[in-house]
Image (cartoon, grey):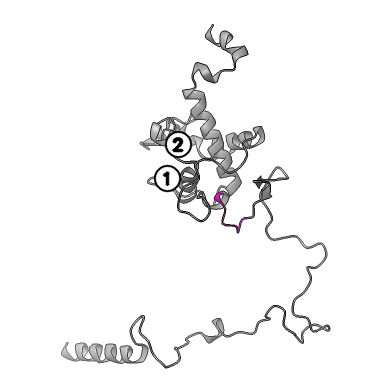
Amino acid sequence: MRYFLLVFAVSGIALLGICGFRGGLSRRPPIELFPDMVRQNKVRPQTPGDFFPDQLSSRLIPANTVPRSGPYQLDGEVLSVNGKPVFPYEDSAVNTGRIPGTTNWAPVTPLTITRQLLQRGQQRYQINCLPCHGPDGDGKGITSKYGMVAMANFHDKRLIDMADGEVFNTITQGKNNMGAYGANVPVVDRWAIIAYVRALERSQLATDEDVPDPYRAQFKK
């Protein structure tokens, strides 16, 4: 046992002597276990190259190329915020649920609420959310009959007052017993679901003042 501890101590000292401490400063070049991951042949933009006959390393986009990512769309129509299309790589509330440049949640959905968006939200809600949260959003879905309890009730004041951006983050990252749906539900569909959830809340918590004047008398009958 003594020899084992001695060998272990000597090996540890030798390892520290070779690698040093994390964050330590040294004039020696770093040890590169896999140098090909750092130093590899590549073409730098706007530099001459011998691979192509015209010796231009930067190339024009080939004809009929399909872009890898474009602006968000709903049923073929480009969605925009403040008149500008939104791309998946942008620091936008559409992608993060937060006001750009801050850590504050976006209070309301950045997308324009349309009948088309609500219909999409209803469809996606019924597929992804209804089993747990129920058709009315009261947390009484089919899973409650199989032992799953404490499903969120969207008609609770806490969730009614919750910023749309925080709801978006919960759908994306998950919370408590709810798993993350970011990999399953696209960004636009998440906002569509939120819009539909707000419609569910409005349907359950509406007052007489929410009914248009021409229909208010008929509603009271």
What quarter of the picture does the C terminus occupy? top right
For the image, the number of numbered tags is: 2
Under mark 2, the amino acid is: Cys
User: Badge 2 is on which residue?
Assistant: 132
User: Which circle marks residue 178 in the picture?
Assistant: 1
Dots 1 and 2: beta carbons under 8 Å? yes
Q: Which of the 4 image quarters holds residue 143?
A: top left
Outermost residue, left direction?
A: 2
Residue 43 within the magenta-colored segment of the rendering: no
Q: Main secondary structure of the magenta part?
A: loop
Residue 101, position as x, y percentages in the image: 51, 56
Image point 42% across, 45% down: which residue? 178
The secondary structure type at the circle numbered 1 is loop
- Specify whether 117 is left or right of 149: right
Q: Nearer the viewer, residue 79 or 13?
A: 79
What quarter of the picture does the N terminus occupy? bottom left
Under mark 1, the amino acid is: Met
Residue 132, position as x, y percentages in the image: 45, 36
Can residue 186 be seen at all in this image of the molecule? Answer: no
Q: Which portion, as a residue range, is magenta?
A: 88-93
Q: Nearer the viewer, residue 124 or 97?
A: 97
Badge 1 or badge 2: first in the primary sequence: 2
Residue 110, position as x, y percentages in the image: 58, 44
Residue 15, position as x, y percentages in the image: 32, 89
The secondary structure type at the circle numbered 2 is helix
Mark 1–mark 2 Cα distance, whole angstroms, equals: 9 Å
Q: Nearer the viewer, residue 141 or 40?
A: 40
